[in-house]
Image: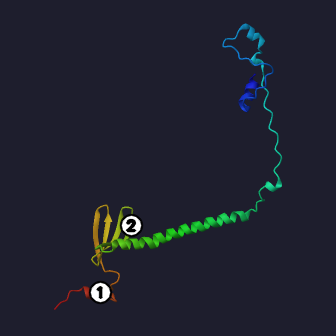
Amino acid sequence: MIAALLVVTLLGPAEVPPVEGPVTLAPDAPTAADETSQPDVTDVVEEPAAPEPRRPPPDIDTLPPPSSGLIELLGPLFKTMLMLAVVVGIAYLTLNKGLGKLVQRQNLGRRIKVVERVSLDPKRALFLVELDGKQMLLGAGEGGLVHLKDVAPAGTEVTKPATFAQALEAQRPETT
């Protein structure tokens, strides 16, 4: 009995065999005469379904061509590498060429421009700022923004004394 339930559970219900003779529907309440004339359903053991017949092997004409190994891998690999190079090239051009021009466009017509920013640590940085052609070095940190020094613009030349003695002479006040 348990084996029959296991077979029905695993394989699904088996087909019902055809009934010979006239088929009558059972009344709602079975009588004693009906019970003796009809076989007991619990005594019937269902046979497991027959295994599916084996399919013949596929025809040689329907099989895919044999694998050529490395050659099949090179095509998709080459396409992937090409697309990766295109993406890296677009990223490079955007970051190095496009953003620089975008910053220049944003600075057009403005009096104050941030020429350069150097981060010293996560909380402190140095800013080279240009205001109306004059450059100055600013320090930013936890305490706020501090003016450190006025700087000569990059295009102008600052004459430096050639020797230490000339530098001292330039710093000495004139006496008359």
Where residue 79 sits: x, y (%)?
63, 66
Residue at the extreme top of the image, as rendered? 32
Relative side of 79 to 53, left or right: left
- CB atoms of marks 2 and 1 within 8 Å: no
Residue shown at the point (56%, 69%) measured from the top left: 86
Q: Position of residue 83 (x, y in %)?
A: 58, 66
Give the quadrant of residue 15. top right
Q: Which mark is residue 120?
A: 2
Q: Earlier in the sequence, mark 2 or mark 1?
A: 2
Secondary structure beneath dot 1 equals helix
Name the image quarter holding the N terminus: top right
Separation (CA) of disc 2 from disc 1 = 31 Å
Mark 2 Cα shell of 10 Å, populated few (<14), some (14-19), many (≥20): few
Three-letter amino acid code at disc 1? Ala
| Left or right of 113 on screen, residue 18 | right
Which residue is at a point 27% across and 77% down the rendered structure image? 132
At label 1, counting other C-alpha atoms closer than 10 Å, the crowd grade (few under 14, some 14-19, many 20 or more) is few
Residue at figure coordinates x 36%, y 73% from the top left: 105
Residue 167, which numbered label?
Answer: 1
Q: Element at badge 2?
A: strand
Q: In the image, is residue 89 above or below residue 175?
A: above
- Observer-nearest of 28 and 55: 28
Q: Residue furthest front?
A: 22
Choose between 162 and 69: the one closer to the eye: 69
Q: On screen, 104 above or below 66?
A: below
Q: Amino acid at mark 2?
A: Leu
Residue at 71% in and 63% down: 72
Residue 136 position, x and y percent, is 29, 74
